[in-house]
Amino acid sequence: MPHLRPSQTCSASPRLVLPALPVVSVILLLLAALLVAGCGSGPRRISTSPSDQSVKYPKGQPQGPRAKPYTVLGKTYHPLLSAHGFSEEGIASWYGKDFHGRKTANGETYDMYGLTAAHKLLPFNTVVKVTNLQNGRSTTVRVNDRGPFVGDRIIDLTNTAANQIGMLGPGTARVRVETVGDVPGLQDGDMTGRFYVQVGAFSNKDNASRLVTRLQGQGWNARMYWADMVRFWRVQVGPWSTLSEAERMREKLKGDFAVNFVVAD
């Protein structure tokens, strides 16, 4: 087997002296020489065709490392163990080119032209239907990121998803978020977390305060807080540790509050 002298570099092709060897040995020596001579060439081109960039999405199961509590801007969030029956209403926003191509919270690459979303609590890969309550238009997206952490917003959509529900220009819209299809992290048909039943929203703080006092007088644990994005005082009862328990309480409250719904904290 020939060797390069110490003074030789990769830019010089080695001179091979081939003794009388079997044909197979000669072929092997020629291949080795080609490899040595090529060590000074540029980097190989890597194909970027879609078949070479297939994505295997994480399972999104609660025991995974990204299901652990996390802290953003001094607040700690506890991702839900299941999204079974999840539904909430609030303000949606969208995020675009400033994040395009960056890593999402579950390790994927953010694509502003895809159909994904960021949510603070839902398990990764949960599929949700997002409906713009102002025009009735809806889209279906998959949760692969965490956020939004601005004001009272509940979900961040891609450019494409925002366009589908007519909120690309305004930037935000009041929406309903509902889980659809198979839900990752399902545990015995229930979901754990912190759930409230919202029974009212008021622009006047005194009206909200009076309702809280009334509910507390009836034995309910009630709270009120200012939702800056919608400019309303929200009145909620709870919390309960499971979605099924919150739903039972919602049914009990229907007699006095026909329009109520469960929200996750």
Image (tube, grey):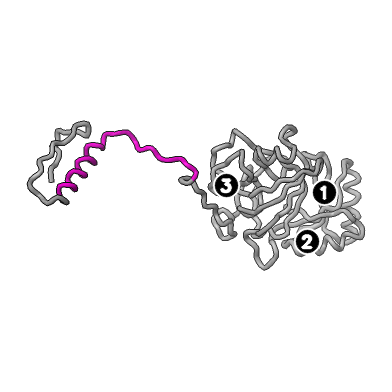
Residue 83 lies in the magenta-colored region = no
- Residue 160 in picture, x, y percent from top left: 66, 39
- Residue 243 in picture, x, y percent from top left: 74, 61
The residue under label 3 is 105
Q: Amino acid at mark 1?
A: Met
Disc 2 and disc 1 in contact, CB within 8 angstroms: no
- Residue 217 in picture, x, y percent from top left: 90, 58
Mark 2 vs mark 1: in front: 2
Q: Is residue 255 left or right of residue 143?
A: right
Residue 218 appears in view: yes
Q: Sequence-wise, which precedes: disc 2 or disc 1?
A: 1
Depth check: give the residue in front, 182 or 185. Answer: 182
Give, as a single range, the part of the protein colored magenta: 25-50
Q: Amino acid at mark 2?
A: Ala
Q: Amino acid at mark 3?
A: Ala
Q: Is residue 161 left or right of residue 66?
A: right
Q: Sequence-wise, which precedes: disc 3 or disc 2?
A: 3
Q: Sequence-wise, which precedes: disc 1 or disc 3?
A: 3
The residue under label 1 is 224
The residue under label 2 is 246
Depth check: give the residue in front, 146 or 163. Answer: 163
Q: Tag 3: Cα neighbours inside 10 Å, few (<14), some, or many (≥20)? A: some
Residue 196 vertical placement versus 30 (above, below): below
- Compute the Cα span from label 1 to label 3: 31 Å
- Compute the Cα span from label 3 to label 2: 29 Å
Q: Tag 1: Cα neighbours inside 10 Å, few (<14), some, or many (≥20)? A: some
